[in-house]
Amino acid sequence: MHYLISYKSTNWDSVLLPLDDNTLQLTIQVRVHLRKVEPTDRGIFDDLIIDGKGTITDRSSGYKYQANPWTMAEWQDFENEYQKVITNYWDKKFDLVPNRPWYKSSKGLTPAKIVCGLSMDIVKTSPAQAHVALSIFNTRKKPNTFRSFINTTAVPKTGCFNRSDVETDMFSWMPHRYRSESAVSRINGVAHAVDYVRNTAAHEFGHILELDHVGGTGNDMRDYGFNNVDDADTLLGVGRAQSAKFAKPWNQRLRGHLIRQNHEDQLVNFTPTLSTPQMIGYWDNGELIHVGGNLWMLKSLFGL
Ligand SMILES: [Zn+2]
């Protein structure tokens, strides 16, 4: 089996390099252009309109948000945090393990595993040179932030983020604008009030890697995995755990790097595994009961 060291594409570039006789690293390289949006800017970003006076309006919902000016320090912090978050959540999280020896090392054929690396470069020049161009608004949690998104069909991909997206916070069961009271997590089929630890920038990076939500391709509760707390607790649910199935971008790209020369080579395939055990990132507040109307109450509160 031969392999290509480097591979370039519109969605990302990648490099496959040996580390030792039993290990290679496949690094996906994503170039991201970050553009700061100031309140004096005017423009249309998908459904968001910014009017030049700092008011952001969501055309689909009618909701309004306030864009604040960026200080130099805030922008610097955002860039640094974004780099840190993406590396922490996505670099070297998976290994691709082969079913048989395939790699021609100095000691003969070995069943070398592939470490899945992620490197993100922030492009300062023009968005055209990036794989992803993100517009960042300085909106904070209070009074509210708009829902961040990535448009994966554009080339380069585009998206809008809030400054607070790099922060890790709790995604709570309590009703809020984007979530009805009936959107509760299920544990063994039973409704529970569950809080999740999450990071929006890390979740959205999954979409930049062309991953769908853990339970489907849409934005319904089922797509976020609420039918099963372990799914909901993943990065492409509403939590922060990695799942071996999110190694798909590496497993697919590896096929582009490998040059299979004979029948034996055709028999080689790789299984994605997690490189480290994942911590549980949710807190279960207990079972819920329906108390009429559209309200859900904690069962433990009433001792029922
Ligand atoms: Zn999403």
Image (cartoon, rainbow, N blue to C red):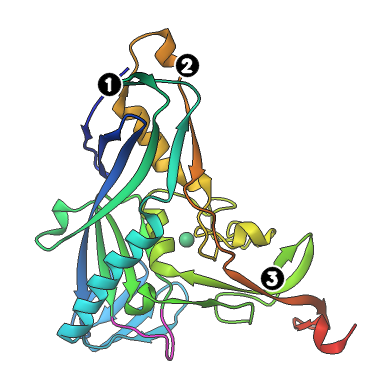
Q: Quadrant of residue 227?
A: bottom right
Task: Please report the residue visible at 22 percent of the width from the left and 85 percent of the height from the top.
Answer: 39
The residue under label 2 is: 267
Disc 1 residue type (three-letter) = Ser
Indicate the secondary structure of the residue bearing disc 3.
Answer: loop
Task: Please report the residue visible at 26 percent of the width from the left and 52 percent of the height from the top.
Answer: 119
Residue 253 seen in render: yes
- CA–CA distance between discs 2 and 1? 22 Å
Task: Please report the residue visible at 24 percent of the width from the left and 78 percent of the height from the top.
Answer: 77
Segment colored magenta: 138-145
50 part of magenta stretch: no
The residue under label 3 is: 184
The residue under label 1 is: 106
- CA–CA distance between discs 1 and 3? 55 Å
User: Which label is found at residue 120?
Assistant: none
The N terminus - image quarter: top left
Indicate the secondary structure of the residue bearing disc 1.
Answer: loop
- Mark 1 closeness class: few <14, some 14–19, many ≥20 residues within 10 Å: few
